[in-house]
Image: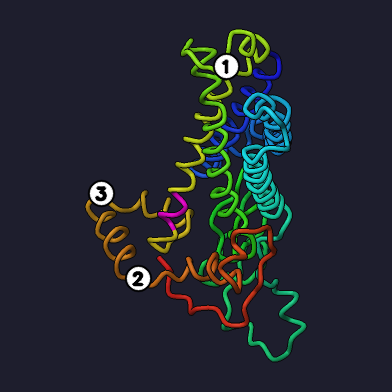
């Protein structure tokens, strides 16, 4: 039971960080100074890594021996092991890449002053960090610097999501959603048989007794799956309407519902070119199959023009 409670508390901590980070974005003057946010900011990465390790341990030690009679020898066991390992490796790789890879920072005034061929009078600089304030560039109050094509500051990775690491972030959401679907499939039958007392030839009374409180993991997995699906759907929507999360929040504050539907759904969703979709995601890999395996970004020489400004 202790293991289950640790998982639940880890998920709760992640949700708490997300909620407080959202409040900080909406009310930057107040929520940024709260001690609770500072504490959670230092601990937010730990529960995610713990859940990664617990997920692979739970599958191989608890679920797989029950589901498969001849562990690692039967065709079902090989398929289960391949799917779980593939999704887990992709999920962990993209999460670590989104956390470690720099989102991309514009040049500072000092760096440009060393280049005599650039006329600084034609450029705009951020008053807070002295970096070039180009289109799509936003200043992150958490990182105290401007970020190229910044989407948002992610509380789960404690890093900004921008030009160079958005693909990792989006692929993490996608692979995590697929992994949670597989986890829900794997934990549904134990929950149904052991907790709802549905008769099953595989999950007998002795097996349920041995499984113990692990049978309730289906509820935890379902809750996290719902949250990740909402996140994936939201960021997919932002790519379709060709707008960053920061600009989306600004539009929500300025526009009425009717104007929001017209400007965002119709004009951006149906008429505008998907520049952000190409810049942040599609142009990050040379081959489509490289999105399906752990791989680093491949920065192309030519990117589509900037036509996505609010």
Q: Please name whichever residue, 14 or 197, is drawn nearer the observer in this view of the structure.
A: 197
> In the rendered view, would you say 269 is above or below 176?
below
> In the rendered view, would you say 127 is above or below 119?
above
Q: Are marks 3 and 2 in contact (CB under 8 Å)?
A: no
Alpha-carbon neighbours of circle 3 within 10 Å: few (<14), some, or many (≥20)?
Answer: few
| Residue farthest to the left, as pictured | 258
For residue 257, which numbered disc appears in the image? 3
Q: Residue at x 57, y 34 (%)?
A: 183
From the top left corner, tell me how far across and down residue 303 is, in percent: 55, 78
From the top left corner, tell me how far across and down residue 277 is, in percent: 48, 66
Helix, strand or loop at label 1? It is: loop
Residue segment shown in magenta: 234-238
Left or right? Give the position of 116 relative to 196. Answer: right
Tell me, yes or no, if residue 216 can be seen here: yes
2 or 1: mark nearer the eye: 1
* Residue denoted by label 2: 272
Q: Residue at x 60, y 50 (%)?
A: 172
Q: Are marks 2 and 1 in contact (CB under 8 Å)?
A: no
* Residue denoted by label 1: 203
Alpha carbon separation for disc pair 3 and 1 = 51 Å
């Amino acid at each position: 039971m202790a293991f289950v409670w640790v998982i639940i508390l880890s998920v709760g901590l992640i949700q708490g960080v997300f909620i407080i980070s959202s409040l900080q974005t909406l009310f930057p003057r107040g929520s940024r100074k709260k001690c609770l946010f500072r504490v959670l900011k230092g601990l937010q990465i730990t529960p995610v890594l713990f859940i990664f390790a617990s997920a692979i341990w739970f599958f191989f030690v608890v679920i797989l021996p029950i589901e498969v009679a001849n562990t690692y020898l039967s065709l079902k066991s090989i398929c289960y092991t391949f799917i779980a390992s593939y999704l887990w490796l992709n999920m962990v790789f993209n999460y670590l890449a989104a956390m470690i890879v720099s989102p991309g920072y514009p040049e500072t005034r000092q760096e440009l002053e060393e280049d005599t061929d650039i006329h600084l009078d034609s450029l705009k600089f951020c008053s807070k960090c002295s970096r070039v304030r180009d289109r799509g560039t936003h200043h992150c109050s958490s990182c105290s610097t401007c970020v190229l094509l910044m989407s948002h500051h992610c509380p789960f990775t404690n890093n900004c999501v921008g030009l160079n690491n958005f693909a990792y972030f989006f692929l993490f959401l996608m692979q995590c959603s697929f992994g949670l679907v597989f986890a829900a499939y794997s934990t549904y039958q134990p929950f149904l048989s052991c907790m709802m007392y549905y008769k099953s030839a595989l999950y007998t009374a002795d097996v349920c007794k041995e499984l113990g409180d692990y049978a309730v993991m289906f509820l935890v997995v379902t809750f996290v799956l719902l949250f990740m699906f909402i996140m994936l759907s939201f960021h997919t929507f932002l790519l379709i309407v060709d707008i960053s999360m920061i600009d989306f929040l600004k539009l929500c504050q300025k526009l009425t519902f009717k104007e929001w539907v017209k400007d965002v759904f119709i004009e951006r969703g149906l008429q505008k070119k998907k520049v952000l979709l190409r810049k942040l995601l599609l142009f990050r890999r040379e081959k489509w199959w490289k999105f399906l395996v752990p791989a680093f970004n491949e920065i192309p020489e030519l990117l589509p023009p900037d036509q996505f400004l609010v």
